[in-house]
Image: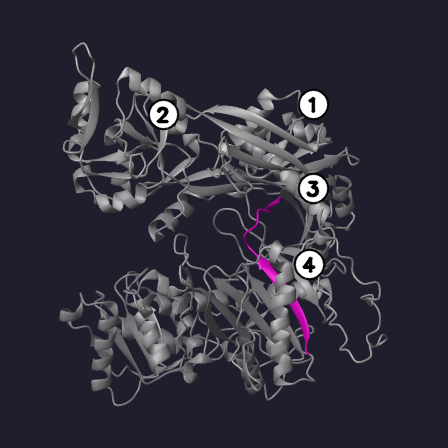
Amino acid sequence: MEPSGPEGNGAHNGVQPPSSDVPSNDVPGQVEEVNAPAPLKKKAARVPIARRGLGSKGQKIALLTNHFKVNVTNVDGQFFHYSVAVSYEDGRPVDAKGVGRRVMDRVQETYSSELSGKDFAYDGEKSLFTIGPLPCNKLEFTVVLEDVSSSRNNGNASPDAHGSPNHSDRKRMRRPYQSKTFKVEISFAAKIPMQAIANALRGQESENFQEAVRVLDIILRQHAAKQGCLLVRQSFFHGDPRNFADVGGGVLGCRGFHSSFRTTQGGLSLNIDVSTTMIIQPGPVVDFLIANQNVKDPYSLDWAKAKRTLKNLRIKASPSNAEYKITGLSESPCKDQLFSLKQRSGNADGEVHAVEVTVYDYFVNHRKIDLRYSGDFPCINVGKPMRPTYIPLELCSLVSLQRYTKSLTNFQRASLVEKSRQKPQERMRVLSDALKRSNYDSEPMLLSCGITISNSFTQVEGRILPAPKLKVGNGEDFFPRNGRWSFQNKKFVEPAKIQKWAVVNFSARCDVRGLIRDLTRLAEMKGLLTEQPFDVFEESPQFRRAPPAVRVDKMFEEIQAKLPGAPLFLLCLIPERKNCEIYGPWKKKNLSDYGIITQCLCPMRINDQYLTNLLLKINAKLGGLNSLLTVEQSPNIPVVSKVPTMILGMDVSHGSPGHSDIPSIAAVVSSRQWPLISRYRATVRTQSPKVEMIDSLFKKVSDDEDEGIIRELLLDFYVSSGKRKPDQIIIFRDGVSESQFMQVLNVELDQIIEACKFLDEKWCPKFVVIVAQKNHHTKFFQSGSPENNVPPGTVIDNKVCHPRNNDFYLCAHAGMIGTTRPTHYHVLYDEVGYSADDLQELVHALSYVYQRSTTAISVVAPICYAHLAATQLGHFIKCEDASETSSSHGGLTSAGAVPVPQMPKLQDNVSSSMFFV
């Protein structure tokens, strides 16, 4: 394989490095050059650290996991990697999805002897792999495919403007449309030794290993493709309607399986899990549109919206069952849409002449196809822009397994969660059945690799870490039970004051006076000193239908006119619980324009439990704390309490699918008031759409000015922690995949170090970098009682973790619904020298300091807070100017990159608060 990255550039042009180069492990300064600056030496890249040992604390528990042991006997074999180029007869490259697989299947059928009878694994694009070499390093083939998906005139569509249903025209059209010739070039690219897998299992990873496992995963994808599955990365979906769950709006959740090879401490394993993707409801197009637009009948459909929704979807047309891609809709209804039909005259010379007929007339009278309702509606267009081909609506059915990639509504998301949850025992049964049905034992490529897969769940040993002791008001300490606790008959550990406040009601139906009475009563029970509100501001009915920003401005005019001074807190009643248009403009006006803490609520089902949960948020926002870890106050947290330690949580939030022009939002939260680890503040910035690496951690604008995120947080830590700089900085990073670990270590960490050096050149804090992943497919089950989820506090660092790197799984929370999803923590970097037990206990403890709830949460609080801050301030961008065109959000246009709009700055008096909880 060619070396990747900048170091490999020289290999391509044959330039050798000069022999006088200083080896990278020499002491700097040993070689001097006279009258010339020393060449810049490339800094050694940081790599993820190796595991230093396993944890031992906690009560042992026997578990099963959805990893299935894989044996590889052919370790001396080699994969041969070939590049594949598929082109049309005229040399144009083929870029249509799915065509490559059909072409390569035909190559294998037609030219088996030229390929020495070898099976191959093809990735559907440009790579093909065999075990052992093909006869030649370069092979060229020609194959012919019957191109069903674009055959135009085989009994199902209206002829296009140049076509005719008559015999001679059909004969003329068959040649270009019913078959296509493809040229295939296969050329040798590289050898990949299977020994690389065995080496990786001993902790010696190489680039060859990544490639070898990629080949195994491609074999699984090809195996699924041959069974007619929809492939979504390493997840496979069958078209069996029993796998579908209707979530509303013409969208179905389709249940399938994730299947991928993993290297673990216990050897190579196959990780199989349940996976769900969203698909378009197959069947009649009209039924899908009615469901999608939530109308009663086709007469109520918005056809402009329907045109956008249907574009590029695939249909089958009756009676021929030919498949097409939708390109649009006809301008006129079927009864009125004219096209030019060519006919031969009945006289002897048989002249061809064109007749204008409607699509409806052509199908009913010429083709004798009964149309019940299509006449009044647009036709489906499956032709090209200049050559439309129309098919009446009722003859079109959507093909199964077409992905729906737009973001789901809240209702759809709730419905999906409800219908796709599985108890642990049910999930184990489904996974066992999936492995049996997949029939990997018969896959010829796996057989050639000497691969056999166990059908038993892997046994692992977990440990249950004890819950940390919590402190609440009146000096009371207690241990949470089963990851939960209650504030019934308890006071907050640091209650705030609710003073100089008012209530604002944006037309929510509610007994506002009763709400204030109950909230005040409960606040006092929790220890909050609560004044009576100044006033209740009801929205004037004349503004209810005004734009959201106008409604907010009018409300603030009224507040300013009536209040004696600026309020410190506003309680805001909004009419909708989710997606309320008022929310973004209201938050922006309060936090950015006026510096007022605010709490929104939708008064639908209000009871004491709801209001207590609301008070958890209000108290934290106003500077109080609901509960603390007892070891924070002692202070007695291993490592953290000994020297000033700052904890960071970092996350980037992206626009929803289909909104690739909305800026990404980077949020970093940091602990403050050391030795506490329960109090945080957030800094949030915008950056280019879909960019995962945070680009504004260090932002030098002049020789003595840095406008980056980290400087702001470091200064806050210094001021709030008794003028102490942190000696240790522990970074929790969310949302990055394993392929991005090197960037986190060598790009983001570099920026953070630069920000520290910029403040004080001599200051060298020690760093710990931990990535948290929720988006993985490893699950754990209790072997003794498979009907129950694993207990909260369960940690696993053996058998299914990385053979070399320092990682562990933690289920900190009590999984109440479905099957618990553990968080996978990767310790990429550790200059502090944590023991496995101390680090696992710190991560576990940080799952108990989340001020919004009275439960342990599934991922450390700093990451949750970063996500909340990014989401809340993301509403600022959405409401900045709803009328702006999407190109103004940032991204690329024909004129080049468009600047990303800046996040509005928060007022100083709220920026250091926990406004995001």
Q: Is residue 569 positioned above or below 383 on the image?
A: below
Say whether residue 588 is magenta.
no
Residue 519 coordinates in the image, percent (x, y): 33, 73
Q: What element carries label 3?
A: helix
Residue density around tag 3, few if under 14, some if 14–19, many if 20 or more, within 10 Å: many
Asked where in the image residue 4 lies, by quadrant, the reply is: bottom right
The residue that mark 1 highlights is 116
Question: Which of marks 3 and 4 precedes in the sequence?
Answer: 4
Question: Which of marks 3 and 1 precedes in the sequence?
Answer: 1
445 left or right of 702? right
Q: What amino acid type should be assigned to the residue bearing mark 2?
A: Ala
Q: What amino acid type should be assigned to the residue bearing mark 4?
A: Gly
The residue that mark 2 highlights is 322
Of tags 1 and 3, which is closer to the observer? 1
Residue 36 coordinates in the image, percent (x, y): 77, 78
Of tags 3 and 2, which is closer to the observer? 2
Q: Distance between the residues labelled 2 and 4?
A: 62 Å
The residue that mark 3 highlights is 212
Question: Which of marks 4 and 2 precedes in the sequence?
Answer: 4
Question: Which of marks 2 and 3 precedes in the sequence?
Answer: 3
Q: Residue at x 55, y 68 (%)?
A: 649
Question: Which of marks 2 and 1 precedes in the sequence?
Answer: 1
The magenta segment: 765-783
Residue 7 coordinates in the image, percent (x, y): 71, 59
Q: Residue at x 70, y 64 (%)?
A: 46
Q: How far apart are marks 1 and 2 (CA)?
A: 36 Å
Residue 58's disc number: 4
Q: Distance between the residues labelled 4 and 3?
A: 37 Å
Of tags 4 and 1, which is closer to the observer? 1
